[in-house]
Image (spheres, rainbow, N blue to C red):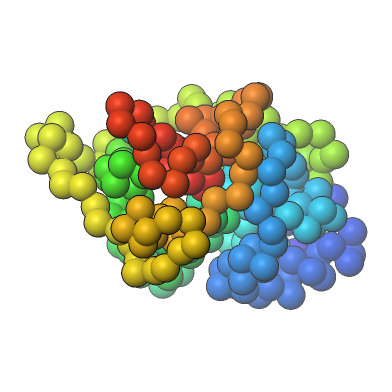
Amino acid sequence: MNSNGFALTTGFSAKELRKLRSMKDAHGIQKFLDALPYHLEDTAWSPRRVLAEETAHCLEGAIFAAAALRANGYPPLLLDFEAENDTDHVIAIYQRDGGWGAVAKSNFTGCRYREPVYRTLRELALSYFNIYCNLRRERTLRRFSDPVNLKRFDRQQWMTTDKPVWFIVYHLFDIKHYPLLTPTMEKKLHLRGTISKCESSRGSPSESCYWNAITPNVPAKLLSGPAVKKSWLLEPLFAVPPPNSIPQSWSM
């Protein structure tokens, strides 16, 4: 039992609980998430289901990380990001020695783990800003939310239910979000360059480098259902965006 009442609210089996606690800390939880394949379904699985299926997407990874953090003595907190002309993102957050850090599931390494060195949640959110861009190379991150303590959903057994946890998604729709930039800042943003030097068999390096660094693996369609929040489950349709299009960047 710990100060977050985890032992009183969990429905995990002893084996599941040992697995969660074996991760020990945020870095261990991130290593576990990094080893999981990024799955393709329009789902909202509970952490127990993620353990059983051994796969997750962005939303499920963040919810799983919140439960694993709780099992290791932290409150189960989420932070939601909103973007323009791009996909939104969800991260699990934790605080240590006065600094904020994050654990996240993403196809792009730059949108995953953060060490707990950020003094405020705004600082933490801004650490994702420069790396957060779409295939037009636009810097797209705009807002971050109030933190959400998933303890509020304990009666709905969010950690272990066999039912989808869409109620968490709906709550993320409703909570307050704060702008990261002023309108003047937004107007003066520059396009980002490619994020790495690479060669590809799918075209010239200049055309395909950015795509390959992201390596999305979700079908090229917008999946239906409440998971689509501009969307956690959407991938780009083209390696190089055609004229007059605003493709989504990657499946976060």
Q: As displayed, is residue 213 above or below residue 236?
A: below
Residue 192 in the figure: left or right of residue 68: left
Please report the residue visible at 64 percent of the width from the left and 63 percent of the height from the top: 33
Between 24 and 192, which is closer to the camera in this rendering?
Answer: 192
Please report the residue visible at 67 percent of the width from the left and 68 percent of the height from the top: 35
Between 5 and 158, which is closer to the camera in this rendering?
Answer: 158
State the image coordinates of residue 215 (x, y, percent, origin top left): 52, 56
State the image coordinates of residue 116 (x, y, percent, origin top left): 41, 68
Residue 94 in the figure: left or right of residue 131: right
Q: As displayed, is residue 26 above or below residue 234?
A: below
Please report the residue visible at 39 percent of the width from the left and 69 percent of the height from the top: 198
Residue 164 in the figure: left or right of residue 134: right
Residue 53 visible, this angle: yes
State the image coordinates of residue 223 (x, y, percent, origin top left): 63, 29
Between 70 and 104, which is closer to the camera in this rendering?
Answer: 104
Q: How many marks?
A: 0
Picture quadrant of residue 195: bottom left
Residue 92 visible, this angle: no
Between 140 and 245, which is closer to the camera in this rendering?
Answer: 245
Residue 186 in the figure: left or right of residue 38: left
Please report the residue visible at 31 percent of the width from the left and 41 percent of the height from the top: 136
State the image coordinates of residue 19 (x, y, percent, origin top left): 79, 69
Quarter occupied by the N terminus? bottom right
Q: As displayed, is residue 37 above or below residue 81?
A: below
